[in-house]
Amino acid sequence: MDNRSSVCTASVLLLSLSLCFLPSAGAASSAALLEYECNNGTSYAANSTYQSNVRSLLATLAANASRSSFPPVGFATAVVGASPNTVWGLGLCRGDTNGTDCASCLALAPDIAFGQGDYCMGVKEVSIFYDRCLVHYSFRDFLTSPDNRLVEARDGSPDNVTRDAGRFDALVVSLVGALSDWAAFNTTTRYAVGTMVSDQGFTTASKDVVRRITGLVQCTPDQAPGPCRQCLQALVDEMPAAFNGSVGGHILRVWCNLRFEVFEFYDDSPMLQLVAPPPAPPPSSSPPESRGQTGGNGTRWRQTAATVSAIVLGVAVILLSIFIFILWRNTRTPLSYQEDDDPASLLFDLPTLRHATGNFAEENMLGHGGFGAVYKGVLPHGQQIAVKRLDKSSGQGLKELRNELMSVAKLRHNNLTMLLGVCMEGQEKLLVYEYLPNKSLDTFVFAPEIEKRLLLPWDTRYRIIYGTARGLLYLHEDSQIKIIHRDLKAGNILLDNDMNPKISDFGLARLFNSDMTSYITSQVVGTLGYMAPEYVVLGHVSFKLDVYSFGVLILEIITGKKNTEMFESAVEESTTVLSFVWDHWQKETPLEIMDPSLDCKNTETEVLKCIHLALLCVQENPADRPTMLDVLVMLHGHASSFPAPSKPAFTFAYGESSSDRDLGTKRADAVPSVNGMSISEFQPR
């Protein structure tokens, strides 16, 4: 009698608890069922202990997720019952869902778990995906050994893009990839939403014109940044095959999920708002024009020269106005550091910076290069800064400082070093940057001590490659003014506390307007080994110059060798890194180029993909190199879809013939002549 009474009491309490979380009509309508999966390999009997445990589990998940300790609410796991009727479960609500709506959504799960007919009644392992929450329960302990491949639900919109479907897919992948980075590395909720807007638009089969793509990614918030990013990357890799031109779709799994649509389907404000780059112009069928041609070509050259002259004159007027204004302000009252968005907040007064750096004390010097010295400083409120101070004897000067100020002042991206301000008083000309404690990439990747190189395991090196690519894409296509860096190298990639990369040193950068894609210069500047052949030989400047430098940088990160370093190869001749890599690529032994400090047993596919991508970036013909948008898409994809690379530029080896030995000379004639007036070889911040 007592036992029956206890069972009845427990049943009443359980029913009451379940009723507390039954959704109202409004809540139910706001949580739409997307997919559900019943693993029919196992089953339980009606009214069995296992069924009772499932009911208890679902009620517990709804209650606990609604008041989860993870910020915000929305995640819970639970285990109910004893063997052999133990049930393990997980509940996760979308990141923009409050506690009440989360509980209401999760409380819908019994409809699928115990519904008659086509639902999952009697099945021991079930996954249920609503647009606002998901539930998974199983007779197996999936919590202690997460495997995101056990369950998958995917679906795409029946409406498709009818033109430029490949470009649409690439933009979707770029958006979802950026959101994945944001969710994994910039949040504790492991959730991100955002948009990609295209001015050109895409026509669909339903005759609509799509100009806006919205995306969402989410991991369970108990995951560390690395595992979350890897989980999402596995889904991103499936997207091209799953959604070929589809204007919407989702891939739903237990530990992470993603979704994209052409309408807004979430309640949050977008965390990322990206602008799609314009489509690449069709390749010209006419041969390249030389600077000495006349007639129609000469007319076009004169028009181009007039346009460039007007732009240069306009920029010069703007620069002159800025510096007259700054000098006028400095002759009145020196401005102190301010923490706001007012333009004056870019101005520092000299006494503040002298005090911050200990009057530019030698012990605070971080490095010294063509521009001058860089000092560490601490502002009065405790913020650490890096101060770049122009040497009076420097070959560089106001031109480079103005260029850097104009280039960086309004750039805001996670993978670019932030300019905090400028100071010009008397003979002092100073730029103030955020301080990055890990200094530059070259201090790690080229370190003679293996202990220091071990601080860059493969996952960190891959994150540096990926982050640098994102920064370059922003400069080339997403910033208000298109920028070619012209001096991308390991020494100009700074690392923050978490070893995330930030592109720095814009002293040689060139600004483009939206109509320009290339120009020719008579002054070739940069760093040997990173400059593309068309730039070194012809002075041709385009975005593909940075792509070439990026390819060289990837190979340095993988090999741990400087691109200008000469070393003995297996064939007993001195060779460069590009020659070394190309030789192993042709021999189908590319993994032998890896830095000996790397252990990539489980990531060989990723390493091979990066080698393949780097070789595409350093091809001799700039037209054969990918754009940075292409690079981001390839980093999300599989190398099997990449084109085969051609032989890189500047691949040669130094062999020594008998006549060379007699004359005591090397075959230096293999080396092209370059203008080496570069600059910026110091170790920044």
Image (cartoon, grey):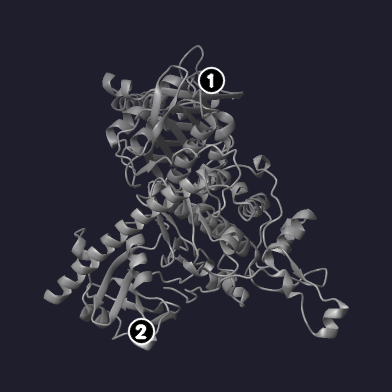
Q: Position of residue 575 (x, y in %)?
A: 74, 69
Query: Which disc, if any, is residue 450?
Result: none
State which tag comes first along the sequence, 1 or 2.
1
Give above or below for 251 relative to 319: above
| Among the 4 quarters of the image, the one containing residue 98 | top left
Residue 61 appears in which quarter of the rendering? top left
Residue occupying image coordinates x 36% and y 60% = 407
Q: Nearer the viewer, mark 1 or mark 2?
A: 2
Image quadrant occupied by the C terminus: bottom left
Instruction: Tell me where residue 335 appears, x and y as whole percent.
Output: 16, 72
Which amino acid, mark 1?
A: Gly
Task: Please tell me which residue is depicted at 51% across the width and 68% down the height of the picture.
Answer: 526
Q: Amino acid at mark 2?
A: Lys
Q: Which residue is mark 1?
A: 122
Q: Residues within 10 Å of mark 1 (few under 14, many from 20)?
A: many
Is residue 110 in sight in this rendering? yes
Residue positioned 68% across, 66% down in the render = 577
Query: How packed is label 2: few (under 14 Cα within 10 Å), some, or many (20 or more)?
Result: few
Q: Nearer the viewer, residue 12 or 75?
A: 75
Residue most toward the left? 332
Look at the numbered disc 2 and give the secondary structure of its residue.
loop
Residue at numbered disc 2: 392
Judging depth in this view, the residue of 313 and 446 nearest the camera is 313
CA gap between label 1 and label 2 equals 82 Å
User: Which quadrant would the N terminus be assigned to in this image?
Assistant: top left
Q: Secondary structure at mark 1?
A: loop
